[in-house]
Image: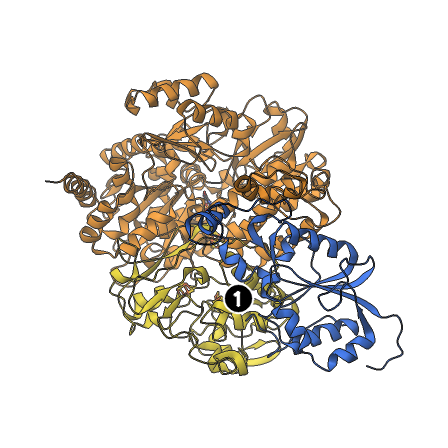
Amino acid sequence: MALSEMHAEAVAGIVDRVATRYKRDPVNMLQILREVQEACDWLPPEAIDRLQTVLGVPRTKIEGVAGFYSFLYTEPRGKYRILFSDNIIDRMAGSQPLIERLCENLWIEPGKTSEDGLVSVDVTSCTGMCDQGPALLVNNRAITRLTATRIDEIAELVRNKTPLSEWPADFFKVEDHVRMADIMLGSTMQPGDGLRAARERTPSDGYMASNMRSWREGLPSGISGPSAMLDEIKRANLRGRGGAGFATGLKWEACRNAQMKPGQQRFVVCNADEGEPGTFKDRVLLTAHADLVFEGMTVAAYTIGARRGFLYLRGEYHYLLEPLNAILERRRKENMLGNDILGIPGADFEIEIHLGAGAYVCGEESALIESLEGKRGTPRNRPPFPVTNGYLDQPTIVNNVETFAAAALIALNGGDWYAAIGTKHSAGTKILSVSGDCERPGVYEYPFGVSIRQVLEDCGAKDTQAVQVSGPSGICVGVDEFDRTIGFEDIPTAGAFMMFDQTRDMFEVARNFVHFFQHESCGFCTPCRVGTSLLKNLMDKLHNGHGSPYDFAEIEKLNQLLQAMSHCGLGHTACNPVLDTIAKFRPAYDQRMEHDEFKPAFDLDRALSEARQMTRRDDPGAHITGHNVALGEEA
Amino acid sequence: MNAPVKKKLKVATTSLAGCFGCHMSFLDIDERLFTLLEHIEFDRSPLTDIKEVHPECDIGIIEGGLCNAENVHVLRDFRKNCKILIAIGACAINGGLPAQRNHLPLSAILEEVYHTSPGLSNGLIPNDPELPLPLNQVHPLHEVVKIDYFIPGCPPSGDAIWKVLTDLLAGREPELGHGLMHYD
Amino acid sequence: MSHTFTLDGKTIPFEDGQTIIQAASKAGVFIPHLCYHPEFKPHGSCKLCTVKVNGRQTASCTMRASAGMVVENNTEELNAERRALTQMLFVEGNHFCPSCETSGNCQLQATAYHLGMMSPHYDHFFPSRPVDASHPEVLLDFNRCILCSLCVRASRDVDGKNVFALSGRGIKTHLIVNARSGNLADTNFTLKDKAAQVCPVGVILVKRNGFAVPIGERRYDNVPIGDSLETATEGR
Ligand SMILES: Cc1cc2nc3c(=O)[nH]c(=O)nc-3n(C[C@H](O)[C@H](O)[C@H](O)COP(=O)(O)O)c2cc1C
Ligand code: SF4
Ligand code: SF4
Ligand code: SF4
Ligand code: FES
């Protein structure tokens, strides 16, 4: 047999094995592609050939999906695929010299695969390790606390082709860094307590008038826990922790009341995509309090009448898959998942973990659902909303990890208890992912209403110039606003809290964020697909010393357009970092207006470089001078 | 258009990486040229023999995109000396035909033209300092200097040119309605 | 309850389930659009059809009409934003209309005329997108693809073939065809496919057929887009 045929046969074997485990169902396409790649190091055309047959779907569909996710490769990318986290916080911690060092060490160029097919080094969006960066991923496994020494060790291991399983365990250690714990991070709730409490609940005089439908149509009558549980969630005044702050009780109720066609069911989805740069609190919850999260999902299932749930875990947290599956397994054994949960007849619920593959937009709930269905992560047209038309067009709730953890606590302790914590419009606590210029980065849990100043003090921040709250899509807060508070009535947040001291250049911070949005735009709609690229080019133009007030006006026009015309939240917020820093750190921009008149974005003299080289000319006529200073290339 | 003649507006024109088609079209405004000449006089232009744009020129009209260093110098000179700059024609506006080379590296093009393909050059890429060097890519005008107005078309019709110029002379924002607006 | 809404002050009747653009075209009001086509499921990606509904901007091809809505369409603000979108589409690809067979029949070009686009305004991306000339009857010139997905929908939903799909992400999003080689010739695409007829721009071109209609008699030479509702809503 020819070598290529052997190869094709081996690949087909891998594809068959993986696909069979996923029931040969195209709805699991993303999971199948991800696992085939784990075995083959990339997605060779032979794998796609085989998938076409095994899954019975057109090649276009497979290639469309494979082409969408950053961590899926249809070209060889090496045995060792190294991706440095490229958030501004990693950069501030010195990631860039480390990238260069590794590349020099391995004799490769960033973004390219080594000639022997051994290794590639590139950057990726924030990997959620800002409190212990700089960080990288090697074949989707996180390595934290990078130093020059560690980089040299990594180079050595790669050169020696040491299998990842034999790399020092310490490399892969991820710290929780819980610096401040409250009801959630300090919870000692035992698995099952929340569920048992929910089961015992009886409706409190029809408070909020929830209807009486139970776990699912067909539960024995007389069990009133579900509607009582819904009342508690509403009473708790719980609002979503994923950023938008939608009332959780209303979402659950809408899903619970959604009409279903025969054969349909309801779904509970936990959004653990945590892609917003600078956010890592879901990582800590899933490491230290996974039971709380799963319990919350089960409580939700109980409340809305769902039988299946998904945890959508970002690919960057691949290392959590095994421990989380072990916890699910334990919960099954303890009858907290599976059939007749805790002895309630007909109370069935299962949770599956799906992994993402490097696409921030998949955190948007409708894109997440598309991704769960094995498709490209394109946000849907809304309405209809997921509560009526979600996973496989069936009623679905999508909530953040922290929202579910809170729901578990509410199940145990009741809505009134929860509502008493925090402020009037922001009940409960909020976990902040604190990183950047401070002494003690990590996760901090506060009752809502805490001031920025308080957080800065607690984490040992000095000379703080600005705080980016809720990540690039959030808001940038300057010194004179440090008395503002965290909460839906003032500064809402999905959790990121990145600090920048007086030595930092806020223009560069904004530029890093703009690069992030450009990289993560899904490309579906014109304004965001093209607009984020134009915005990135303009920010780079300023960075490269070609800026003039003209460009400034252009940026403001683009802001307007992106906000008004974009299809989803990514495009709507992509300009926020620029708008905020322009408003609050104008001098950082003014410094970039090096010219009064319009200048080209590129260096005119350098635009003659190829011709100079080809003609070997270097006379004055072979240069364009005067207007454009040659400056360093954009990094 | 027989208003009392104040001072005539100075108009300069040039063709960069273009084919003179737009200039030909300009002449297509035919007898209206005389009406126009009541209001304007030509400065540097292929229609005159003036070699440099005079400072304080009112309107500069440029055909063709930027293909080489010389194009850049002329364009900057126009920008420096003209109050209003108009890009005329597809090449000036989006690079046009010459920009079709943009997806190829310049070195590959020079190789092909002077080394690989038979003919002219006995294998040498001309390096006479008198010759302007080509740019890595062809650029439309607005990517290098600020352009105030555009007259699209390949070439724009004489009517379109007439419309924009008369709009400008009358102090209106130039507008091309259906039939006059063409990209081809 | 009345089944009408207002569009730029004009009362527009609608039926349940109709989108704003459907109701508007039925009533003879033109809303610029590129990815919408009455025969296919709306996509909502080009955003040209964006209108203001009760003060909020939204795509009129996906938004269902509801009674009493106040919709703004032909306003200077919206048209300026739509113009910026057409400019984005022009610089994103390589659109040299003078050498394009579709010129004069092209919906992007006609829409840009309609919106008074005098220049592409932004810096050009000049992407490198090789053409696919493999097929005996049809040429694919990806340089002009605006990613409207009409061919994708036509091939999937009408032809039942899935010849086309979008791949890549963000600014690297691009059209692919259903063949390992990546060549149209290796797919089961034929000239009779619906997908061969829907491209609003000059990507899917019938070979040996170019410039058949003389200038002056092409689709939009005499009747600008939007002046006849028929031209406004149909593909080529
Ligand atoms: C571009 C984008 C990315 C998002 N990423 C996340 C995410 O990583 N995690 C998350 O919980 N919500 C994310 N969201 C918000 C979700 O769409 C959704 O509102 C949230 O998961 C609902 O959960 P909650 O009500 O519990 O907050 C994102 C939204 C957008 C527009
Ligand atoms: S706004 Fe951006 S991320 Fe959202 S749909 Fe449009 S292109 Fe995709
Ligand atoms: S597709 Fe339309 S806009 Fe693009 S080049 Fe052809 S005619 Fe011009
Ligand atoms: S080829 Fe034409 S129809 Fe298909 S996506 Fe591109 S522009 Fe749309
Ligand atoms: S026509 Fe509505 S978004 Fe394209």
Look at the image and name its color scheme. by chain
Q: Position of residue A130 (x, y in %)?
A: 50, 29
Location of residue A333 in the rendering, given as x and y in whole percent from the top left corner:
22, 33
Q: In terms of depth relative to the viewer, which is nearer, A451 or C50?
A: C50
B121 or C57: nearer the eye? B121
> Which one of the lettered chains is coloured blue?
B
Percent x, y of residue C15: 45, 79
Q: Quadrant of residue B154?
A: bottom right
Which residue is pictured at 47% across the width and 27% down the height? A99
Is label 1's Cβ within 8 Å of ligand 5? yes
Tally of marks: 1
The chain shown in orange is which?
A: A
Q: Residue at x 34, y 20 (%)?
A: A157
Q: Please state which amino acid type lies under the numbered disc 1.
A: Leu
Residue C230 lies, in percent from the top left, at 46, 82
Give the vertical position of B23 relative to C27 (above or below).
above
- The residue at 41%/60% (across/down) is C142
Residue receiving disc 1 = C48
Q: Left or right of A590: which side holds C161?
A: left
Q: Which chain is yellow?
A: C
- Report if residue A203 is visible in the image: no
Q: Along the horizontal axis of the image, is A598 left or right of A180? A: right
Looking at the rendered image, the quarter that the N terminus of chain B falls into is bottom right
Q: Chain of mark 1?
A: C
On the question of residue B46 being in view, the answer is yes
Classify A302 as above or below A527: above
Would you identify the image quadrant in which residue C192 lies? bottom left
Q: Quadrant of the C terminus of chain B?
A: bottom right
Please tell me which residue is depicted at 31% across the width and 56% down the height of the picture. Answer: A392
Is residue A232 shown left or right of residue A139? right
State which quadrant residue A589 falls in.
top right
